[in-house]
């Protein structure tokens, strides 16, 4: 079935990414860690504009 | 230009771990490639740890260089590699790598896609949008849902394949080998490996 096939493919892709040791490299600048989770609420809609491609993602990353 | 969207919150907690890692990596590369690094950025790079994988080793090397090199030297290296006098050693633009010229059809194609997605160029940015740092920013935004909605793996793959796959690996390899690059050489290594990982992962999802 189409859904099952896609799920299996996505699981394979995620496993591959897990094994690719991406975390080793950029841990210091993580945005997804729980330490930063509380900062989401600080990003008001005024700051959060997709009109800039140099952005508030960096505020979250504390650059 | 701002596309309408109902929720501005960055819903990081709803992302898979792997997607957070990917977004981190794009943000990381964009930060180092966009401009001369700040003291704070160099400090955060100095704190990176790496395992024994090629990617881990490159990040450990980069951390070591961030600790050992003066920030002034790192910044002037950035200038030598990317800015120079008239032009830097490297021109990290999709148009340049694909056509030999800046501001070419690849940039026009990118602008079309940006318009479709709802990404607009900041007023204070003078670089063409097909700069590697901008494209990394955009990929991070597609992953995290910054541009109004989350983008499926298939959509991310489509964007990656159209605007990064054909040239970014080559650029990062050039960066690894650039005459002026010491600090930026392992940045090139990390970028090259990551582009490879992204390509392989996208092809596994059956969405190329």
Image (cartoon, helix red, strand yellow):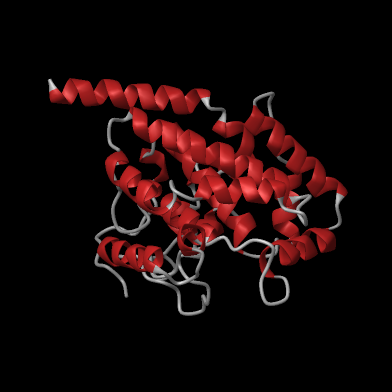
Specify whether A24 is left or right of B132. Answer: right
Q: Residue furthest bottom?
A: B123
Residue visible at 52% across and 57% down in the picture: B132
Q: Residue furthest left?
A: A1
Specify whether A41 is left or right of A10. Answer: right
Q: Residue furthest front?
A: B100
Residue visible at 45% across and 33% down in the picture: B18
Task: Answer with the quarter of the image where residue B35 lies.
Answer: bottom right
Give residue A25's position: percent from left, percent from top.
Answer: 63, 37
Give residue A7's position: percent from left, percent from top.
Answer: 25, 24
> Can residue A63 be seen at all in this image of the molecule?
no
Quadrant position of the C terminus of chain B in the picture: top left
Number of marks in the image? 0
**Camera-side residue: B208 or B39?**
B208
> Can residue B4 be seen at all in this image of the molecule?
yes
**Camera-side residue: B206 or A34?**
B206
Quadrant position of the N terminus of chain B in the picture: bottom left
**Camera-side residue: B51 or B101?**
B101
**Camera-side residue: A60 or A39?**
A60
Q: Relative to residue B66, is residue B85 depicted above or below?
A: below
Give residue B123's position: percent from left, percent from top.
Answer: 46, 79
Q: Relative to residue B59, is residue A9 depicted above or below?
A: above
Q: Relative to residue B109, is residue B161 depicted above or below?
A: above
Task: Answer with the quarter of the image where residue B78 lies.
Answer: bottom right
Give residue B38's position: percent from left, percent from top.
Answer: 71, 62
Residue visible at 30% across and 61% down in the picture: B113
Task: Answer with the quarter of the image where residue B204 lies.
Answer: top left
Specify whether A62 is left or right of B128. Answer: right
Specify whether B90 is left or right of B70. Answer: left
């Amino acid at each position: 079935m189409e859904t099952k096939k896609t799920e299996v493919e996505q699981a394979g892709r995620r496993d591959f990414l897990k094994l690719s040791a991406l975390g080793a490299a950029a841990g210091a600048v993580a945005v997804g860690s729980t330490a930063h989770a509380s900062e989401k609420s600080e990003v008001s809609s005024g700051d959060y504009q997709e009109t800039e491609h140099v952005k508030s993602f960096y505020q979250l990353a504390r650059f | 230009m701002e596309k309408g969207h109902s929720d501005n919150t960055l819903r990081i907690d709803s992302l898979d771990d792997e997607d957070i890692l990917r977004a981190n990596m794009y943000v990381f590369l964009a930060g180092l490639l966009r401009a001369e690094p700040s003291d704070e950025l160099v400090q955060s790079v100095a704190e990176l740890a790496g395992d024994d994988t090629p990617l881990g080793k490159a990040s450990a090397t980069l951390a070591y260089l961030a600790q050992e090199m003066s920030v002034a030297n790192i910044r002037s290296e950035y200038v030598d590699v990317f800015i120079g006098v008239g032009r830097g050693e490297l021109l990290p633009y999709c148009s340049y790598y694909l056509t030999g010229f800046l501001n070419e059809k690849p940039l026009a194609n990118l602008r079309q896609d940006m318009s479709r997605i709802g990404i607009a160029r900041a007023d204070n940015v003078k670089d063409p949008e097909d700069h590697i740092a901008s494209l990394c920013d955009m990929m991070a935004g597609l992953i995290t849902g910054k541009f109004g909605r989350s983008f499926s793996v298939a959509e991310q793959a489509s964007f990656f394949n159209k605007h990064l796959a054909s040239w970014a690996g080559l650029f990062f390899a050039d960066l690894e080998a650039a005459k002026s690059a010491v600090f930026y050489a392992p940045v090139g290594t990390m970028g090259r490996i990551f582009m490879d990982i992204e390509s392989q992962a996208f092809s596994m999802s059956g969405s190329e």
